[in-house]
Image (spheres, rainbow, N blue to C red):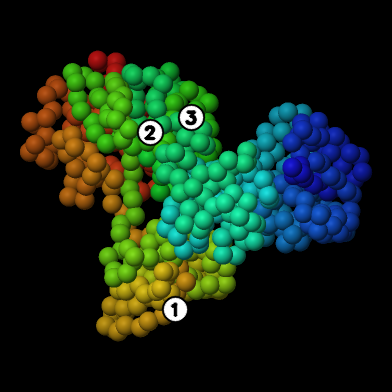
């Protein structure tokens, strides 16, 4: 496999020589390092590299160059390699250039000269960016391949699982991809056996169940121990934060998720209001960073694995998993978050996975290049999904029941939507029917203000409506509010059943449920803010109360 390229540009020969030397010293085993003193020459070289099917992972360019400024070079280079990471290099702080670069080319980092020592000022930055780039990099003709039909719910299910778990794969529609048809012929496979997953070693699985595929991919479904200090159920932002802090503070920590790290936030194409990331980051990037951090610190992670029951034995919490095994823990944090609410309209269930999707903008957006796409929902996730889809679709129509987005979406997203010409907001509108032949082809829309209906051609419908807490699986008598969210802390005092279950002399801790030692954090908890940052904060805070609970027991 060809090595990806790190491309450096600086008009000062001595600076360029030193830069290339330092980069090669650290990254030559994994990357090819190229450099030039001419921005124009660099652009010509990039065209040649593109024709040779080479891949550029990262650009690092000087800002003040006589032929053109670094920002202008990066802007032109991105037309050839839009997924490459971008670093701007300058001899002094230039805030104006940095702001321009962030807005014009989505700059990932602004690096000052000199970068000595590189171990402190250069390598950490580049390693972080290159790791992030590698998480979404899909090499051509090698690695995992999924062959199936674009409009097959089973194919969508597999793609969504692999994408959520950050497994790079190549999707091949058997009706459009010649090499997919050739693979079927070579292995004597029938179309009825699709979707089929081909692995790098040449083996394959036909219509694999998710647990079987997960095992083949090296994911863990069984715990190493029988007893833990704390188990977190759900690997969304709250669960990931709790896992990081629990392990870092010496607790034997287990994190369990039925699908993949990230939760609902993991499907967000761009989170721009999370502290410390001025250029934003995708939900999958955030989840990837967090799960790596948690496991490095000692957290054990099981996925895909589902907890189907909780029971109490003395002061221990016994968890029953979907595979029938049991795990014992001294404390428990429920961080199962929320799930998208089902759209109750005729035909929606029939075409789910075949043109209609819940979330999944990151997984399916490429399939709708130049198509007419509709999106239901007015929250931040809907806004982020619409912006991502607009990069591919001819038009994206956002359907909301209200008159505008001001009460449900952050202003920065509203502004971006208004500035995107192929995104159109349709207020007071809802979907009442979905029609098609094996895939979605038309939607019947109703204007609830004017009491009128119209039928429109539609290639896809992405649903981001409301949310419901994922608590139906809990059989234990834990107090929830009318919406199914778990009540915690002093809010429990208003429930008559609280006194029957709580027998301790102290009041429940802030995030503690009506069962001592069982806590709730993040969106699954009543009163949560439904923001990534607040979920992370609650996950970390829950560990504090776990310590206090364990100390008294």
**Residue 466: % across, % down:** 32, 58
Label 1: which residue? 457
What label sits on residue 369 in the rendered view? none
Q: Residue at x 23, y 44 (%)?
A: 472
Quarter where residue 439 is shown: bottom left
Q: Residue at x 61, y 58 (%)?
A: 181
CA neighbours of label 2 inside 10 A, class few (<14), some (14 to 19), many (20+): many
Mark number displayed over residue 256: 2
Tell me the crowding category of disc 1: few under 14, some 14 to 19, or many 20 or more residues within 10 angstroms, Cα based. some
In this rendering, position of residue 324 left or right of residue 375: left
The tag earlier along the polypeptide, 1 or 2, is 2
**First along the sequence among labels 1 and 3:** 3
**Horizontal placement of 259 versus 370: left or right?**
left
CA–CA distance in space, label 1 to label 3: 46 Å
Secondary element type, mark 1: strand
Label 3 sits on residue: 294
Q: Is residue 229 left or right of residue 161?
A: left
Q: CA distance from mark 1 to mark 2?
A: 42 Å
**Where's the C terminus, which quadrant?**
top left
Q: Nearer the viewer, mark 1 or mark 3?
A: 1
């Amino acid at each position: 496999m060809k090595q990806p390229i790190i491309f450096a540009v600086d008009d000062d020969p001595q600076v360029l020589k030193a830069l290339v030397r330092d980069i090669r010293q650290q990254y030559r085993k994994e990357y090819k390092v190229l450099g030039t003193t001419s921005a124009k020459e660099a652009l010509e070289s990039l065209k040649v590299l593109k024709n040779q099917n080479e891949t550029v992972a990262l650009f690092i360019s000087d800002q003040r160059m006589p032929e053109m400024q670094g920002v202008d070079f990066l802007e032109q280079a991105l037309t050839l390699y839009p997924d490459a990471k971008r670093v701007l290099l300058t001899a002094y702080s230039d805030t104006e250039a940095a702001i321009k670069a962030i807005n014009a080319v989505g700059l990932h980092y602004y690096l000052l000269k000199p970068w000595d020592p590189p171990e402190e000022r250069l390598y950490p930055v580049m390693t972080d960016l290159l790791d992030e780039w590698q998480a979404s990099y899909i090499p051509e003709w090698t690695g995992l391949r999924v062959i199936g039909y674009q409009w097959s719910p089973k194919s969508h299910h597999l793609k969504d699982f692999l994408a959520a778990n950050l497994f790079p794969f190549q999707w091949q529609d058997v009706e459009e991809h010649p090499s997919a048809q050739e693979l079927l012929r070579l292995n004597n496979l029938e179309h009825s056996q699709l979707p089929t997953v081909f692995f790098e070693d040449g083996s394959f699985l036909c219509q694999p169940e998710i647990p079987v595929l997960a095992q083949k991919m090296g994911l863990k479904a069984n715990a190493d121990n029988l007893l833990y200090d704390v188990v977190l159920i759900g690997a969304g932002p709250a669960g990931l934060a709790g896992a990081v802090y629990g392990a870092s503070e010496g607790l034997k920590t287990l994190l369990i998720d039925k699908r993949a790290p990230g939760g609902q936030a993991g499907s967000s194409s761009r989170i721009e209001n999370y502290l410390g990331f001025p250029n934003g980051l995708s939900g999958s990037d955030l989840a990837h960073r967090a799960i790596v951090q948690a496991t490095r610190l000692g957290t054990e992670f099981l996925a895909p694995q589902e907890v189907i029951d909780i029971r109490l034995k003395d002061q221990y919490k016994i968890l029953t998993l979907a595979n029938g095994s049991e795990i014992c823990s001294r404390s428990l944090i429920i961080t199962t978050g929320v799930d998208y609410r089902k759209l109750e309209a005729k035909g929606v269930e029939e075409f789910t996975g075949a043109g209609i999707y819940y979330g999944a903008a990151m997984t399916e957006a490429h399939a709708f290049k130049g198509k007419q796409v509709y999106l239901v929902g007015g929250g931040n996730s809907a806004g982020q999904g619409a912006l991502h889809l607009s990069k591919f679709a001819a038009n994206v129509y956002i359907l909301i029941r209200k008159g505008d987005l001001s009460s449900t979406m952050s202003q920065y997203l509203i502004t971006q939507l208004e500035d995107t010409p192929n995104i159109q907001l349709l207020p007071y509108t809802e979907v009442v029917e979905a029609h098609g032949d094996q895939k979605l082809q038309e939607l019947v829309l109703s204007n609830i203000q004017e009491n009128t209906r119209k039928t429109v051609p539609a290639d896809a419908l992405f649903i981001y409506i409301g949310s419901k807490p994922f608590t139906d699986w809990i059989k234990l008598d834990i107090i929830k509010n009318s919406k199914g969210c778990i009540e915690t802390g002093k809010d429990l005092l208003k429930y008559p059943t609280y006194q029957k279950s709580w027998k301790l002399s102290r009041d429940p801790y802030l995030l503690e449920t009506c069962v001592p030692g069982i806590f709730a954090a993040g969106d699954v908890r009543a009163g949560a803010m439904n923001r990534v940052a607040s979920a992370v904060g609650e996950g970390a805070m829950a560990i504090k109360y776990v310590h206090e609970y364990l100390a008294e027991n």
